[in-house]
Amino acid sequence: MKFGDFLFPESSDPRRDGAIIDDALAEARLCDELGMDAIWLAEHHFDGNCAYVDPLTFAAALAVATKRTELGFAVLQTSLYHPIRLAEQLSLLDHLSKGRLILGLGRGTFFNIYEYQGYGIDADEAQARFEEAEEILRKAWTSESFEHQGKFWNIRAPSLRPRPYTKPHPEIYRATSSEGSLRECGRQGRPILLNPQSNATTRQRVDMYRQGMREGGFGEEEIAHNVGKIWVWRSIYVAPTDAAAESVGRPAFTAMIEHRKLMRDQVERDQGIKLSPHLAPGPLGFLCGSAATVAAELAELAAIGIGGALMQFRLGAMPYETAAASIELFMREVAPQFRADREAAE
């Protein structure tokens, strides 16, 4: 199983945004030096829950600041972008990183209505915009020139420059959670990203994806290959003992979950609007403990057959130094156990 650091840095004070962004860059460099397999970027706007806000711009900085680690998006809020501009930006990033991109796309947030309001987009159009934008991305990357007549965009485009570094283009992952989307991605044979849940729920969702692939006519070898590409999101804090981890990590995780609700709760009070409250993330998918405890939890995930754990080490307002110590302990005492298994399997 591979491991990725999910850079999702909270900044509760606008005056601290720059410092938090600097910390995120330092965390990425640390992970690259320690041999983390991937660095993942989020995208959220206006609320301070993701300090760097624009993952494309930040990924360009990481592409030149790191040397080995893959760079993933979990996920780009695709409905907020003009698809041709996005195709150009991603092609450039593909070149800057020399093919290290993991391209996770999604429609946009399911629960922060103010992100759509701030961009002047109807949240009810988000899924349709996403589907059309992805169609245009693929055309832009694989056609010499093309025309597109759609609901949201009418395009007559010459050949895109630069063409992607990865041929024909970076593989596109989809963030999924509902039973319907899991099975449909399976039927199409599309790689997926899974949001935070318990290990038991993760197993159920992977089984739905497997069933979808069977319905799509894929064989068991192809199914195992695709399941081996799945990345699952977990928050994490590792300390020398379980007690030490609980005393620091649990309060930081709880405070982070509460902070992420602040603006959406304010919008509900001010406007009487709350977007998909049943989909808002809660206190799930948290790994907290000693290296042995965390390794045991991850072993359950590995047994499902998934490819990677996408882990948020810096929890909310946690100081950078505290998160860095957790990362270093993880890479020293947890990751080698799974890398030995992976090398043996290969």
Image (spheres, grey):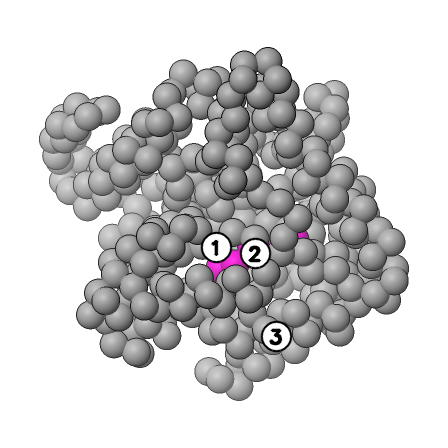
Vertical placement of 68 versus 164: above or below? below
Given the image, on which type of amino acid does mark 3 rest?
Ala
Residue 310 visible within the image: no
Residue 196 visible within the image: yes
Outermost residue toward the bottom? 344
- Report the residue at 23% width, 24% height from top: 152
Span shown in magenta: 231-235
Using a 10 Å C-alpha cutoff, classify the residue at mark 1 as few (fewer than 14 neighbours), some (14 to 19) or many (20 or more).
Answer: many
Which residue is denoted by mark 2 in the rendering?
197
In the displayed structure, does residue 306 sit left or right of residue 251?
left
Toward the viewer: 252 or 136? 252
Using a 10 Å C-alpha cutoff, classify the residue at mark 3 as few (fewer than 14 neighbours), some (14 to 19) or many (20 or more).
Answer: some
Which residue is denoted by mark 1 in the rendering?
194
Outermost residue toward the top? 270
- Report the residue at 39% width, 44% height from top: 105
In the displayed structure, does residue 87 sit left or right of residue 28?
left
Vertical placement of 344 versus 291: above or below? below
